Amino acid sequence: MSDSTTVESATGRPPRADKVATVQQIIAKLNDAEAVFVTEYRGLTVAQLAGIRLALRPNDAEYVVYKNTLAKLAIREAGFDSLDEFMVGPTALTFVKGDIAGAAKVLRDSAKALPALVVKGGVLGQTALSAADVAALADLPSRNELLAMFAGALQAPLVKTAGLLQALPRNFAYGLSALIEKQAA
């Protein structure tokens, strides 16, 4: 079993079933996520971490802390080697299945409010992201904002056309009314 040998080679003794299961869980989350962000959380309280998790939930993102050794094994096995360099110190992984820009925004805003939270980088699909790239993603409009812009762009010509179509009979009625008043006078 390749999973067992990977965990065994890292620890020097037979793998524990729970560690193998954790590595498999991380691999599954890496493969399911559209993007993964890595943050350092040194100095944050449990309540602050819970606040970050809660803020990420509407974006279909999950903020999880794993042991670095297990996370590194999973990262290598899943083929996300670019994340390996970020796995130093107390790190957490944010797995994003939904709104990537929204999740990046939450992490950026949380890092502003909590200076102990440091966004290190991540991956988008198979593309490696630096901390600056994650910040640039945070500046993009969220999915809902993009959909609203698109709906507005579709609606604008229709509203303009409706206004023009309403103006024709209205102006005709004003003209007719003025003509009738002129004839009466």
Image (cartoon, grey):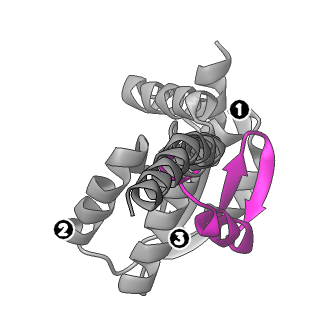
Instruction: Locate residue 154: give its quadrant.
Output: top right
Residue 83 shows in this picture: yes
Q: On the image, numbered disc 2 is attached to which residue?
A: 47
- Disc 3 residue type? Gly
- Residue 159 image position (x, y, % from top left): 55, 45
Residue 90 shows in this picture: no
Sequence order check: which comes first, mark 3 or mark 1? 1
Horizontal relation, residue 144 to residue 155: left or right: left
Sequence order check: which comes first, mark 2 or mark 1? 2
The reply to whether the magenta stretch includes residue 145 is: yes
Label 3 sits on a secondary structure element that is loop
- Disc 1 residue type? Glu
Any mark on residue 77, and which?
1
Select label 2 or label 1 by which is in front. 2
Q: Please report contact status of discs 3 and 2: CB closer than 8 Å, yes or no.
A: no
What residue is rendered at 61% in x and 46% in y?
Answer: 164
The reply to whether the magenta stretch includes residue 162 is: no
What residue is rendered at 67% in x and 56% in y?
Answer: 122
